[in-house]
Image: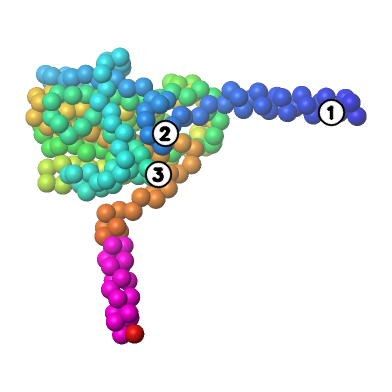
Amino acid sequence: MTKRLVSMAAAVLMTLGTSAYAGTFVNGGFEDGNLGGWTGGGGTWSGSPAAPVNPAVYNGGTPNNTIMSGGTDPYTGANRVYTGNYSVRVNDSINNYSVSTLRQSVTNYTDNSIFFAWNAVLEASHGLSDSDYFSLTLRDDTTGTDLVSRAYSSAGAIGSGTSGVTWTNYSGWYSSGWVVEQIDLLALNAVGHDFTLTLLASDCPYGGHAGYVYLDGFGSVVPPNDVPEPGSLALLGLGFAGLVAARQRQKKAA
């Protein structure tokens, strides 16, 4: 009996030890109301280098990343938050040469999937190599391969930037809408690997056009889209107003 208890205790300790070293993304939905767990960088871009700009160039620079708490985007009308109470906006709508990055790495990620949602907003400007744009990469650091690689300027796709994405023009501002990425690590035999997510959003290099991207819901389960769209909120408001009016009529009739 004693040997059996010792064996069971050892098994429990081994399990706890494995769990203690299992990684997960920190503050993936930004529900802490801050950027804890994430690293930002930033700077400016001028001239016309070949796009996309390498995010590593901006490591250590001053980021332009803002926690968003609801509301709608002023150019597209889309919700600024995909799920929960908060998201992050990388860069902003001020066209002042700015570049901003955001990244997070995790080691020994043992969940079977990675999910996250993003929404890019880019002002129409110049050509592929000198327009405002964004890039997003989810890299398997263990194998040195990119599982997700998107890059898009307001002049068009760079690489696989438009795969599975429908871009809409809102009076000179292009938007992807909210895109949910789904990576099946089990199918890729990548459970337990190390990963890094990197985003970059940039104005054009002439200071005339802006670009930014929202990120939300990063984790091991599909982020629920539990924030009503503005149209839905309007319908709810009309429905509530109708209910109040009906009750007032009933009171008068009584």
Which residue is depicted at the point 14% across and 24% down?
97
Distance from the alpha carbon under mark 1 to that under mark 3: 44 Å
Nearest to N terminus: mark 3 or mark 2: 2
Rendering quarter of residue 54: top left
Residue 180 visible somewhere in the drawing:
no
The reply to whether the C-beta atoms of the residues labelled 3 and 2 are less than 8 Å apart is: no
Whether residue 97 is in magenta: the answer is no
In this picture, residue 188 sits left or right of residue 181:
right
Q: Position of residue 2 (x, y in %)?
A: 89, 26
Residue under circle 3? 84
Residue under circle 1? 5
Tell me where the magenta segment starts and ends, as one range. 236-253
Which residue is depicted at the point 23% across and 29% down?
91
Residue under circle 2? 32
Quadrant where the N terminus is found in the figure: top right
Distance from the alpha carbon under mark 2 to that under mark 1: 41 Å
Mark 2 closeness class: few <14, some 14–19, many ≥20 residues within 10 Å = few
Q: Secondary structure at mark 3?
A: loop
Q: Position of residue 15 (x, y in %)?
A: 68, 28
Q: Secondary structure at mark 1?
A: helix
